Amino acid sequence: MRFTEVDLFGVYVAPMSVLMAAAWLMTIALRLFADRFGLLRHVWHPALFVFSMYIVVLSSMVLIAAH
């Protein structure tokens, strides 16, 4: 995949911003899953854990898109 601008309703957007929004939505879904089953109770700092999870999801999506 070439990282070229994405046309959203006539506005050119950087592909990284689209990937960031998709990773944010996926992180929200993962956080709801973790809240539902009480997994966030077992981590030391829940906000830091969620941020780390976002970074992992985003970097995974970038690596998959670049391949």
Image: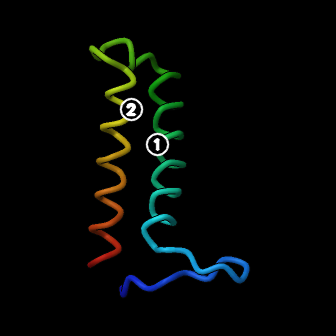
Residue drawn at 53 percent across, 22 percent down: 36
Crowd tier of the residue under label 1, counting other residues whose Cα lies within 10 Å: few below 14, some 14–19, many 20 or above = many
Q: Name the element at disc 2.
A: helix
Q: Point out the image quarter for the C terminus.
A: bottom left
Q: Which residue does the numbered mark 1 point to in the structure image?
A: 27
Q: Residue at x 45, y 63 (%)?
A: 19
* Quadrant of the frame with the N terminus: bottom left
Q: Are marks 2 and 1 in contact (CB under 8 Å)?
A: yes
The residue lying toward the viewer, choosing from 37 and 55, is 55
Q: Is residue 37 above or below residue 18?
A: above
The residue located at (38%, 82%) in the rendering is 3
Q: Is residue 52 above or below residue 7?
A: above
User: Which amino acid, by three-letter code, is at mark 1?
Assistant: Thr
60 above or below 31?
below
Of the residues under marks 2 and 1, which one precedes in the sequence?
1
Q: Residues within 10 Å of mark 2 (few under 14, many from 20)?
A: some
Viewer-proximal residue, 41 or 54? 54
Q: Which residue position is annotated with label 2? A: 50
Q: Is residue 27 left or right of residue 6?
A: left
Q: Tell me the kind of residue under disc 2.
A: Val
The x and y percentages for residue 40 are 39, 19
Give the numbered dot on residue 49: none
Q: Give the residue at the far right of this rendering.
A: 9
Q: Where is residue 39 shown, x and y percent of the image?
A: 38, 20
Q: Where is 10 relative to 40, above or below?
A: below
Q: CA–CA distance between discs 2 and 1?
A: 8 Å
Q: Quadrant of residue 51?
A: top left
Numbered-mark total: 2
Residue 54: x and y in percent read: 38, 44
Residue 43, x across and y down, in percent: 29, 17
Circle 1 sits in a helix, a strand or a loop, which is it?
helix
